[in-house]
Amino acid sequence: MTENKTKRRDFLFTATYAVGAVGAAAVVWPMIDQMNPDASVKALASTEVDVSSVDPGKTITVLWRGKPVFIRRRTQDEIAEAKSVDIEKLKHPEKDEDRAKNPEWLVMLGVCTHLGCVPLDQKGDYNGWFCPCHGSHYDISGRIRKGPAPTNMEIPEYKFVDANTIKIG
Amino acid sequence: MSEHEYIPKSKVGKWFNDRLPLLTLANHLTDYPTPKNLNYWWTFGGILTFCLITQIVTGLVLAMHYIAHADMAFGSVEHIMRDVNYGWLIRYIHANGASMFFLAVYIHIFRSLFYGSYKSPREIIWIIGIIIYLLMMAAAFLGYVLPWGQMSFWGATVITNLFSAIPLVGEGIVTWLWGGYSVDNPTLTRFFTLHYLIPFLILGLVVLHIWALHVPGNNNPIGIDVKKPSKDTVPFHPYIVIKDGFALLMFMIVFAFFVFYTPNILGHADNYIEANPLVTPAHIVPEWYLLPFYAILRSVPDKLLGVIAMLSAILILAALPWLDTSKIRSAVFRPLYKQFYWILVADVLILGYVGAMPAEGLYLLIARIATAYYFLHFLVVLPILGFKERTTPVPLSITEPILGGSPNLATVKNKDSFKG
């Protein structure tokens, strides 16, 4: 008799804790999720850039989602250099063809994959970019070659709307 | 709370105290028996309380004029500096106050390390202290972002990106922290909110820190258990109050020197340039008080391991009461530990120096050696030292070396261990 009563109690306690936990989670989640990007931030997700004035060997920087995007019009020498690298030896092996669909144009997030600084153009040991914060060197394809950054600079989603306009995002 | 029952003299006092024993608490705090040999290194607890109150009061006033918006924050800080009555003074006290706070906390921590104040029965005081220290670093970082200068912006970017080192969920956490895809207005407003919250959390923990201290009582320069109250103790008021007060005055002279004569020397000129998400300053350097940890972060060539090393360097302190196996508290009676202590002090100073230098060549090599030694000190040297070291004889009481004999032999545990 007493044993039965104890079991009944145990069940009630467990059920109460479970309902309480679900309720607490239901209250806590909105408090956490409110910190995620809001609708107005998400709405600014794409941008169009006119690249007609960019000469070969020049880079322009545009702002997309609050982050810089490098658009570099590469010279033939630079393209040849980017393609000649033995990707087996890279920390993050990626072919240049996969990074620049149109080899003349390299479009990538100008954000160091280490801790988010903006690397400097035409600096560093590999003739590409150099991050001044913690010393990461990137090549002319934006691939990490030396330093603490774990991966190559990210390629955003983009397409050529026409010959002179790139839509990022 | 104390050994004797306190009864207020006045009728009103007694009536009030029966209902809320605040007067008993005040009496405990004034009569609180304190070891009579406390030196000036023990005055930094009081100095730190002063620093916390100063930051809260000046911060409250600054918040009346500051605007937490990405387009207006930088301008509102200049408005405080130029237009608000005494705004320059209040802001300079707040900004330099952070540095003074850390200066005092580092002295306070290294005093504990020298005199073994973290050892039994004071582990909880020590761990609460480490939590306070962590919160101080968080508050300092968040506060540094608020003026929305170049260092604010890029410091915020680099520090929040530390979380991206976490596998799988890292990127999601960083986006969540930012409230967007980069450090921007949502980041600024939440940083302001948290910067306002943390000092009050610290205040609560300070109460616990002092409460936990008042259970065993103060450690002291010779690190022995003191019978309280006895010939070895003096009441907190007026003896310690006067000593703390004098030390505080000396400290305030240093504080005032920075505020009035060189208010920007501890900051970075780059932070007087408004935040620009397209350009990273050539040299990102954190404030001086975070440099040793920054050096540890940079000395590891892997992103995730670097972050882990940096966090471990702080969290390892919480385990210190168990890593240090020596029964003797004070370094005064530990000839070997005393030397290792000063090597550690030098090691941390070296880490601080290389943290401010570019992470390349010789600096990087020095940073790596110093990082390795830092961990070696806590994980290898301290545990072994407790077993190997021949300590010198510890007096049985504070008065014994002068008066001879011991008024409190009974309180000395483990007499054999004192014979070396």
Image (spheres, grey):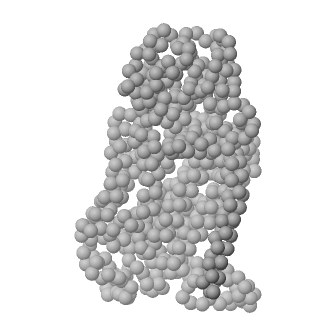
Residue at the image point whose x is 33% and y is 45% from the top: B369
Quadrant hosting residue B248: bottom right
- Count of numbered labels shown in the rendering: 0
Instruction: Indicate the position of residue A26 as horizontal and vertical percent values.
Output: 71, 57
Residue at the image point whose x is 71% and y is 35% from the top: A42
Q: Is residue B156 left or right of residue B399?
A: right
Q: State the residue in front, B379 or A35.
A: A35
Q: Is residue B50 above or below residue B237?
A: above
Is residue B342 visible in the rendered image? The answer is no
Residue at the image point whose x is 53% and y is 73% from the top: B212
Quadrant hosting residue A82: top left
Location of the N terminus of chain B by quadrant is: bottom right
Q: Is residue A73 above or below residue B19?
A: above
Q: Is residue B395 left or right of residue B292?
A: left
Instruction: Indicate the position of residue B25 as horizontal and vertical percent values.
Output: 62, 80
Instruction: Indicate the position of residue A48 as horizontal and vertical percent values.
Output: 69, 20
Q: Is residue B89 left or right of residue B157?
A: right
Q: State the residue in front, A137 or B40.
A: A137
Q: State the residue in front, B58 or B113.
A: B113
Q: State the residue in front, B147 or B241.
A: B147
Is residue B299 visible in the rendered image? The answer is yes
